[in-house]
Amino acid sequence: MKEFVIVAAALLMFLACQPKEAELTTKKEVESIFPSGEKGSDEFFTGNAYALSLVPSDSTLTTLVGNVYFEAGARSHWHTHPAGQILIITDGIGYHQLEGQPRQELKKGDVATCPPNIRHWHGASPYTGMQQLYIIPNNEKGIVEWMEPVTDEQYFR
């Protein structure tokens, strides 16, 4: 009888710690450390993404720094940067993919690099938003070249 009580108590504790179905399908927002910024154009993003320039482009530093907040499910279109790009994830969960490579999951504290002129995309996971800092060095070479949207098949694989 004592073994049954121990097993039953362990089972109840296990079940109580499992996420509820609603928690698995509820979209989660992230804590923003910067204002949202301007909504990104549907020409460059699927879903709602908001960008804010933090260090504007200039001829001295030649580095552009900004923040993008992707709502859950939002993502950039395929694009390249002539001098590359660095992403620093400040909150949430998302994805990043260089063309021809597997999609990579990103979460708070991760850093991703996008080599010069390599097609890539990045954005939030389906259920959790993502906030990122972007750094674009050597912006005298150009900032970004936008391409076609990321398909649902590409996003979900």
Image (cartoon, rainbow, N blue to C red):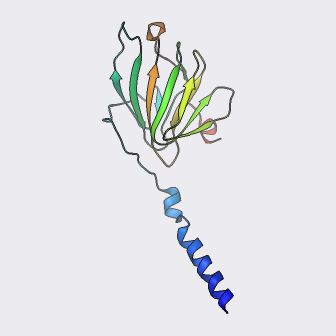
Kindly tell me whether residue 56 is visible in this rendering: yes
Pick out the residue farthest to the bottom: 1
Q: In the displayed structure, would residue 20 be above or below residue 29?
A: below
Quadrant where the N terminus is found in the figure = bottom right
Q: Measuring 63% from the left and 35% from the top, which residue is drawn there?
A: 103
Q: Measuring 52% from the left and 66% from the top, which residue is drawn there?
A: 20
Q: In the displayed structure, would residue 108 be above or below residue 136?
A: below
Quadrant where the C terminus is found in the figure = top right
Pick out the residue farthest to the left: 35
Q: Measuring 34% from the left and 24% from the top, which residue is drawn there?
A: 53
124 and 11: which is toward the camera: 11
Total numbered badges shown on the rendered structure: 0
Q: In the displayed structure, would residue 156 be above or below residue 77?
A: below
10 and 133: which is toward the camera: 10
Query: For residue 2, what is the image quadrant?
Result: bottom right
Q: In the displayed structure, would residue 61 be above or below residue 44?
A: above
Q: Position of residue 9 (x, y in %)?
A: 59, 81
Query: For residue 52, what is the image quadrant?
Result: top left
Q: Position of residue 79 (x, y in %)?
A: 54, 22
3 and 69: which is toward the camera: 3
Pick out the residue farthest to the front: 2
Q: Position of residue 90 (x, y in %)?
A: 44, 38
> Image check: 131 left or right of 34?
right
Kindly tell me whether residue 149 is visible in this rendering: no
Q: Measuring 41% from the left and 32% from the top, which residue is drawn there?
A: 68
